[in-house]
Structure formats: structure tokens, C-alpha cells
Image: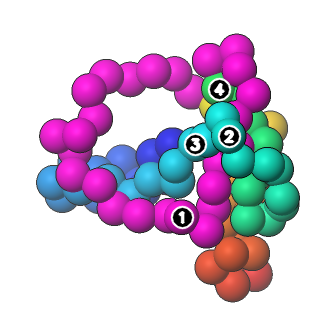
Amino acid sequence: MIVSATPINRARHTVVVVPLSTEAKPRPPLAIPVDCLGRQAVAVCDQIRAVDKTRLLKLEGYLSQKDIDALEDGLKQVLSLD
């Protein structure tokens, strides 16, 4: 899941992502359950990283606003932004 801001994404050769896993167990705030492409997945918030845009092959879809809000809350806790 790309979490970096669009203007930054346009200016850089990398994007900041939170990896999604179908194997991890949900454990908020570190691992947030999300619905991705009709399947249950887990956004692993403590594994945030930058990846080169050349690794991104195509847009697969979007998370629901509910899942985005849960992901945002998890990232705030993991990064101590509250």
C-alpha cells in the first residue's frame, strides 16, 4: 500500500509503502486487517519502507476509506505521531 504523498511520489524515484500480507495475523496497531481485491489481508505497519518505483508494475486497486483510516491510526501509533 503506497502511503507517501502524491507530490513527493512525483518528485522522487521511490515511494513509501506499507506491505500487505495474506499470511500475517492481525495485531493492531502493528498489523491492521484490510480488504484488498476482495481478499482479507494485513497491512504490516511496523514494516514501512521506501521502494523504487520500478518495482511497481501496475495499480491493483484501492483500500476503502474505513481501511485507510485504520491504517492511518496504526501508522500514527507505530511512528508515535499522536
Kindly indicate the quadrant of the structure image that contains residue 13. Answer: bottom left
Which dot, 1 or 2, sits closer to the camera? 2
Residue sitting at x 51%, y 43%: 1
Which dot, 2 or 3, sits closer to the camera? 2
Label 1: few (<14), some (14–19) or many (≥20) C-alpha neighbours in 10 Å:
few
* Circle 4: residue type: Cys
**Residue wearing tag 3:** 20
Query: Which x, y percent locates residue 71?
Result: 70, 52
**Residue 7 sits above or below residue 78 on the image:** above
* Circle 1: residue type: Gln
Distance from label 3 to label 1 (Cα)? 10 Å
Q: Is residue 4 magenta?
A: no
Label 4: few (<14), some (14–19) or many (≥20) C-alpha neighbours in 10 Å:
some
Question: What are the residue bounds of the magenta stretch?
Answer: 37-62
35 to the left or right of 13: right
**Of the image marks 1 and 4, the number of the one nearer the N terminus:** 4
* Circle 2: residue type: Glu
- Kindly check if marks 4 and 3 are in contact, taking CB atoms under 8 A apart as contact: yes
Distance from label 1 to label 2 (Cα)? 14 Å
**Residue wearing tag 1:** 47
Task: Give the label on residue 36, or none.
Answer: 4
Which dot, 1 or 4, sits closer to the camera? 1
Residue sitting at x 75%, y 28%: 40
Task: Give the label on residue 23, or none.
Answer: 2
Q: Is residue 68 visible?
A: no
* Badge 4 element: strand
- Kindly check if marks 3 and 1 are in contact, taking CB atoms under 8 A apart as contact: no
For the C terminus, give its image quadrant.
bottom right
Label 3: few (<14), some (14–19) or many (≥20) C-alpha neighbours in 10 Å:
many
Kindly indicate the quadrant of the structure image that contains residue 21. Answer: top right
Closer to the camera in the image, 74 or 26: 26
* Badge 3 element: strand
